[in-house]
Image (cartoon, rainbow, N blue to C red):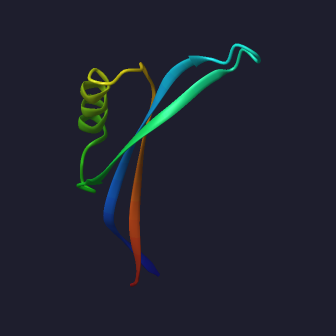
Amino acid sequence: MAIENPIGKRLTLKLSKGTDPETGKPIYTSVSISKIIPAAEADALLATANEIAGLLLYPLYDVQAVTTVELLEG
């Protein structure tokens, strides 16, 4: 059976830039933060994302955390 060994985590902040005047669809951009400790708690990540978003030009729309794991023989 394989064992998952967390080796990294990335936080992506999706920001709302506005609306496309031709289509009316929302326009987004994103900011990624890497080299996050894999054991970081979800509550701490969300709080950090909200604090960082307060320093950015566009409002925060969504937050995603991606954990990278190494698969080992177990």
68 in relation to 47, above or below: below
Tell me what residue is drawn at x 23 percent, y 36 percent: 44
Where residue 26 sits: x, y (%)? 63, 21
Q: Which sits in the foreground, 48 or 70?
A: 48
Q: Is residue 17 left or right of residue 42?
A: right
30 in relation to 24, above or below: below
Residue 13 image-quadrant placement: top left
Residue 45 image-quadrant placement: top left
Tell me what residue is drawn at x 47 percent, y 81 percent: 1
Tell me what residue is drawn at x 33 percent, y 65 percent: 6
Where residue 71 sits: x, y (%)? 42, 77
Q: Which sits in the foreground, 54 or 23?
A: 23
Residue that sits furthest to the bottom in the current view: 73
Where residue 69 sits: x, y (%)? 39, 67
Residue that sits furthest to the right in the current view: 23
Tell me what residue is drawn at x 50 percent, y 22 percent: 16
Image quarter where the C terminus lies is bottom left
How many dots with numbers? 0
Q: Which sits in the foreground, 71 or 60?
A: 60
Residue 24 image-quadrant placement: top right
Q: Which sits in the foreground, 68 or 73?
A: 68
30 in relation to 22, above or below: below
28 in relation to 11, above or below: above
Q: Is residue 37 left or right of residue 46?
A: left
